[in-house]
Amino acid sequence: MIQDVEIKRLQPHADDRGFLMELLRVDDPIFEQFGQAYVSLNYPGVIRAWHYHKEQTDLWVCVKGMIKVGLYDPRDESPTRGEANTIYLGEHNYALLKIPVGVYHGYKTVGAEPSLLINFPTKPYNREQPDEYRAPYDSPDIPFDWEVKFT
């Protein structure tokens, strides 16, 4: 796992009415600070990648559908520099994923239905000076394959 990436397993609490699942609490060890919260709907096969932040940490939960998350560590000072990780989030793997400052990240909706991703970034979005540094989803500098594997 890339250094400073954290995963908090989420537990749905089911009863006759459905289920309730806590996503993030201020007393969670994974929590840093609140910046804002937003939800992103993504159609099957859509890839949203790559970008990283210099100031904010992202905390992702996929609450509907499934996503294939790609992470890549370009940080010079990191012992995991050059490593890439794949993590699946969603209805078959409820988890909160903490993506640290400086780590490239993106995701692809996998399966036949749209995904809903909730993000709790530690800083609010600055429209005048976005804290986003981008690379194309198919960048030759990032060793990651977005294709779904059928093995």
Image: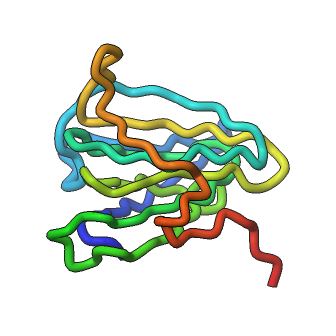
Colour basis: rainbow
Left or right of 72, for residue 122: left
Locate the N terminus and report the quarter of the image it occupies: bottom left
The answer to whether one can see residue 13 in this image is no
Residue at horizontal 69%, vertical 49%?
109
Residue shown at the point (61%, 59%) measured from the top left: 68
Residue 123: quadrant of the picture: top left
> In the image, residue 92 lies at what x, y percent?
65, 61
The picture places residue 32, in percent across and down from the top left corner, at: 17, 44
**Which quarter of the picture shows residue 114?**
top right
Q: Is residue 113 above or below residue 11?
A: above
Residue found at x 36% / y 45%: 59
How far across and how far down the image is residue 110, in percent? 73, 55
Q: Point out the residue furthest to the bottom here.
A: 151
Q: Residue furthest front?
A: 140
Please name the residue shown 44% across and 53% down the image: 105
Callout count: 0
Q: Is residue 125 above or below residue 80?
A: above
Q: Nearer the viewer, residue 123 or 24?
A: 123
Task: Identify the image quadrant of the C terminus.
Answer: bottom right
Left or right: residue 107 versus residue 74 is right
Residue 36 vs residue 84, the one in the foreground: 84
Q: Does residue 6 appear in this view? A: yes
